[in-house]
């Protein structure tokens, strides 16, 4: 069993992951409206990943004898000016999530909660990947600039992304 403080913090992370899923769904909708269906697909996969992250926290809270308490999910913004703007917002968001995960690890260490710390290590690694993939697409978009052909090629590439459920 973990502390009440840890239970609360993990519950807040369930909400943060569900908010991430909701944000990426809003981004998918932005791309679908532009007929950039490959970009939209990338965001739909991102939405599935974030839902899976939320469920990892959900199951962990239960496994440790805690109680999952769901809270309201904030409305995501939908005002982006370009695909590059969307991916810069994605990177900023993932950096924020990395900070949240780091705070959780700090709490687990302060409480000598080794089980939570071990559980959270998966997310530390995952965040490195999340930031790297957003950054890679930002670089590609900068290279593409205003060239429609490059944007089209990138859209086709992002159409190939498929969701792989994380290990339990
Ligand atoms: Fe669940 Fe993208 O962090």
Image (cartoon, grey):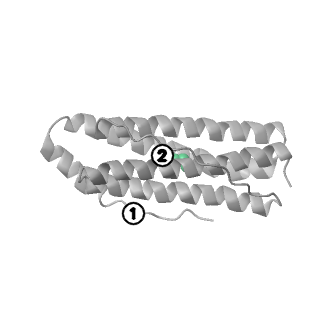
Q: Residues within 10 Å of mark 1 (few under 14, many from 20)?
A: few
Q: Residues within 10 Å of mark 2 (few under 14, many from 20)?
A: some
Q: Quadrant of residue 64?
A: bottom right
Q: In the shown orientation, is residue 93 left or right of residue 57?
A: left
Q: Residue at x 41, y 49 (%)?
A: 26
Can you see residue 126? Answer: no
Q: In the shown orientation, is residue 91 left or right of residue 85?
A: right
Q: Quadrant of residue 54?
A: bottom right
Q: Quadrant of the C terminus?
A: bottom right
Q: Secondary structure at mark 2?
A: helix
Can you see residue 83? Answer: yes
Q: Residue at x 20, y 34 (%)?
A: 145
Q: In the shown orientation, is residue 114 left or right of residue 102?
A: right
Q: Which residue bears the numbered disc 1?
A: 162
Q: Quadrant of the N terminus?
A: bottom right
Whether label 2 lies within 8 Å of ligand 1 gets the answer yes
Q: Which residue bears the numbered disc 2?
A: 130
Q: Position of residue 39 (x, y in %)?
A: 31, 51
Q: Position of residue 34 (x, y in %)?
A: 24, 49
Q: Position of residue 62 (x, y in %)?
A: 76, 62
Ranked by sequence position, the earlier of labels 2 and 1 is 2
Q: Residue at x 78, y 42 (%)?
A: 108
Measured in 3D between alpha carbons, the distance from the residue under mark 2 to the one under mark 1, in whole angstroms, is 15 Å
Q: In the shown orientation, is residue 26 left or right of residue 119?
A: left
Q: Residue at x 48, y 43 (%)?
A: 76
Q: Quadrant of residue 86?
A: top left
Contact? badges 2 and 1 (CB < 8 Å):
no
Compare residues 60 and 70 and report the one nearer the observer: 70
Q: Secondary structure at mark 1?
A: loop
Q: Position of residue 79 (x, y in %)?
A: 37, 37
């Amino acid at each position: 069993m973990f502390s009440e403080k840890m239970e609360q913090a993990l519950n807040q992370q369930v909400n943060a992951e569900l908010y991430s899923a909701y944000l990426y769904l809003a981004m998918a909708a932005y791309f679908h409206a532009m007929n950039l269906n490959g970009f939209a697909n990338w965001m739909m996969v991102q939405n599935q990943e974030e839902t899976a992250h939320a469920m990892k926290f959900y199951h962990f809270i239960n496994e440790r004898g805690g109680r999952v308490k769901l809270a309201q999910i904030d409305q995501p913004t939908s005002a982006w000016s370009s695909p590059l703007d969307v991916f810069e917002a994605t990177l900023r968001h993932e950096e924020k999530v990395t900070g949240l995960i780091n705070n959780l690890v700090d709490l687990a260490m302060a409480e000598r909660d080794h089980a939570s710390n071990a559980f959270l290590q998966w997310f530390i690694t995952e965040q490195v990947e999340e930031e790297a993939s957003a950054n890679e697409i930002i670089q590609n978009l900068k290279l593409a600039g205003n060239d429609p052909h490059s944007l089209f090629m990138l859209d086709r590439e992002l159409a190939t992304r498929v969701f792989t459920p994380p290990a339990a």
